[in-house]
Amino acid sequence: MVLETISKIIKVQLPAYLKKLPLPETIGGFARLTVSDWLRLLPLLGILALLGYLTIRPFLPKKKKQRDSLINLKIQKENPKVVNEIDIEDLNSANVCYCRCWRSKTFPVCDKSHLKHNELTGDNVGPLILKKKIL
């Protein structure tokens, strides 16, 4: 029953619909179409636009997934917020570099992973450098 209905639509109703459409012989003929002619063409033009879009869609640039925009990809993901506190008075050396790119294997201390990150992404992130004041 369903296939008979689809067959009738494709073999009988679709050709009859297409024959009744006010398709002009030339491009200039489109300028002479009335509003009612355009309204009758609208369903066909919509279907053609949809088919055109579906045809070119695989070739369009892909949107970045939300995960690509995350900065922290692996550090303390089980915590709702990553916070590290270090008292400046406890600094052992004159300079300490802390990671701000979240790629350091020794997080929170910088291991210069930002250099590779910056090269790959065009970013300009660098470490936070704390200097111990020598009196």
Image (cartoon, rainbow, N blue to C red):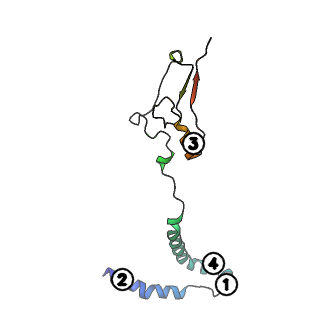
Of pointers 4 and 3, the one earlier in the residue sequence: 4
Furthest-top residue in view?
135
Of pointers 1 and 4, the one earlier in the residue sequence: 1
Of pointers 3 and 2, the one earlier in the residue sequence: 2
Q: Does the CB distance between marks 3 and 2 fall below 8 Å?
A: no
Residue 28 is left or right of residue 124, and the answer is: right
Q: CA distance from mark 3 to mark 2?
A: 60 Å
Residue depicted at 51% across the width and 58% down the height: 62
Q: CA distance from mark 2 to mark 4?
A: 32 Å
Give above or below for 32 relative to 134. below
The residue nearer to you, when weighing 111 against 40, is: 111
Residue depicted at 54% across the width and 87% down the height: 20
Of pointers 3 and 1, the one earlier in the residue sequence: 1
Circle 1 — which element? helix
Amino acid identity at mark 4: Val
The spot of residue 63 in percent (x, y) is 52, 55
Amino acid identity at mark 3: Asn
Image quadrant holding the C terminus, namely top right
* Front label number (2 vs 4): 2
Q: Which mark is residue 52?
A: none
Q: Does the CB distance between marks 3 and 1 fall below 8 Å?
A: no
User: Where does label 3 land, which residue?
Assistant: 118
Amino acid identity at mark 2: Thr
